[in-house]
Structures are given as structure tokens and as C-alpha cells.
Amino acid sequence: MLLKVYAATVLKHSVIVRKLCRLYSSSVKMSLEQAKQVAAYRAVDEFVTNGCIFGVGSGSTVVYAVQRLAERVETENLKVTCVPTSFQAKQLIVKHNLTLGELDTSPVIDVTIDGADEVDSHMTLIKGGGGCLLQEKIVASCSKKLIVIADYTKDSVKLGDRYKKGIPIEVVPLAYVPIQKKIEAMYGGEVKLRKAVAKAGPVVTDNGNFILDWLFTNQDLDWDKVSNVIKMIPGVVETGLFVKMCHKAYFGQPEGNVVERQ
Ligand SMILES: O=C[C@H](O)[C@H](O)[C@H](O)COP(=O)(O)O
């Protein structure tokens, strides 16, 4: 009898603990989403003006930026031309009935708002966690200003402090093995072929290439130099290192405020 009561009490408590854990993890998720949203809204409100050519970044934080842009276009009757950085970005533009542009007709972009996987204290970025780095870098390079929007978990002192998945590198499929070996020989660490989740085999980018993720060990490298050296390896299309490109970063905080860095 005593044993039964004991077992029932343990069971009851473990159910309560599980419920509390679920509640905690959903509130963390909630505050991350809120943090993304406040950063995105702030950036769109500060940088999007009537008549501007706007570069639309990729990823989950950009979804909020496009949402805010669509609200402003509707309520303020703004004329904004949106140039996408990925298939996802193009879909967002179309879904919100915004004006779709392209680099052929809008080669100079006023401002691009994009997410990042990590931002260091020098405003060097890791991008490409979602596989969209090539078009993002092209659009950023055509932009007068690149503005980053992110939640507080992306704000680092050194690259690799917080983002543990490595630096994405887009490569031509037939060259992926020699590129892996060359990067490992030059800089150490491990270079992994990114595998798809709902497909057998590797991730294939919007441009038909593969993604390598370089799990670097030395956090004190000269990232500008490293990016240029890696880009010179035949078969490398682009790296996810964005050096000296970011004009300003907005980090949404769990409390709902936004920290800005320039
Ligand atoms: O490839 C993806 C892009 O570089 C994203 O901008 C980056 O991964 C950040 O995405 P999110 O806003 O989802 O964290």
C-alpha cells in the first residue's frame, strides 16, 4: 500500500516536472521569436523609405522584416522595390504582394536587411546557416547599406563563441572532397559536407551547389584573409564570412528591447 502511494506521488511529480519543462522551453522559444521580431521591426522602421530599392535577406528573422515592410507599404502607401537573396526571400515578397525586383533592373540597392548566424565584435558575420550565402553576398555587395537583424544569441565577441555549426562554404559539387582536404590542411578543424534533412544525400543550394561547413578551431584568424584564400581554391563559389560589409546590427533581447551595434 505504502509502495503504491509512493509510486503515485513520484508519477505525479514527474508529470508536473515534464509540464514545467515544456512550459519553460516554449517560453524560451517565444522570447527568441519576440527578439527576432523586435529587431526586424526596428530595422525596417529606421531604414525603409518611400521609393527605395530594398534587398530582402533570407532566414527566419527576415520573415518578420518582410511582414513589417508589408504593413508599412499598406498603411503608408510606400513604393518599395524588393530584390530577393534566395528562393525563400522571393516567395516572401510574392506572398506579401510586394514589388519584386532583380539585379538586372536594380543593380544598386539602397538597403538590404538580412539575418546572420553570428556577429562578432568587429561586425564580421557568419552567414549561410540556411544555405543562402551566395545570393546574399551578391545582393549585399550591391547595397549601399547591409543591416543585420538577429536575436540576442547571435551576438558574440569572437566567431565561434556561440555559433557552433562552423563557417558555411558553397562549392561546386565535383570539387567538394579536394576543397575539404585543402581547407583542413591549411587551417585545421574539420570540413563537413552538409546533409539534407528530408532528402537522402547533401543539401543542394538555390544555385545547384553543395555546402561545406568548416568547424574551425582557431578563433583568432584574420577572417578577411581567410575568406579570400578559401575563395581562391578552384571550385569554391563563396564563403559565409561577411567581412567589413555590415553597416549596423540590431539584436533583439529577451526583455523586448533592441541592442544596436555599428
Ligand atoms: O542561409 C541563411 C542566411 O544566411 C540567414 O540569414 C542566416 O542563417 C540567419 O538565419 P535566421 O534568421 O533564421 O537565424
Image: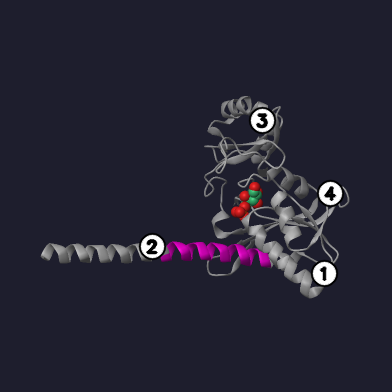
State yes or no: residue 33 in magenta: yes
Of the numbered discs in the image, which one, if any, rests on residue 78? 1
Which quadrant would residue 211 be assigned to in this image? top right
Residue range in magenta is 23-41
> Which circle's residue, 4 or 2, is located before the other in the chain?
2
- Give the main secondary structure, helix, strand or loop, of the magenta stretch: helix
| Left or right of 22 in this view: 35 | right
CA gap between label 3 and label 2 equals 43 Å
* Dot placed on the residue nearer the N-terminal end, 4 or 3: 4
Residue tagged 2: 21
Residue 219 drawn in magenta: no
Label 3 residue near ligand 1, CB within 8 Å = no
Where residue 230 sits in the image (x, y, percent)? 67, 32
Q: Amino acid at mark 2?
A: Cys
Residue designated by label 4:
103
Crowd band around label 4 with a 10 angstrom C-alpha radius: few (<14), some (14–19), many (20+): some
> What residue did someone put label 3 on?
173
Identify which residue is drawn at 54% across, 48% down: 163
Q: Residue type at mark 3: give it.
A: Pro
Placement of 84 over or under 241, stated as above or below: below
Which residue is found at the position 72% from the left and 55% from the top?
Answer: 91
Sequence-first disc among 1 and 3: 1
User: In the rendered structure, are the residues bearing label 1 and label 4 in contact, judged by CB atoms less than 8 Å apart?
Assistant: no
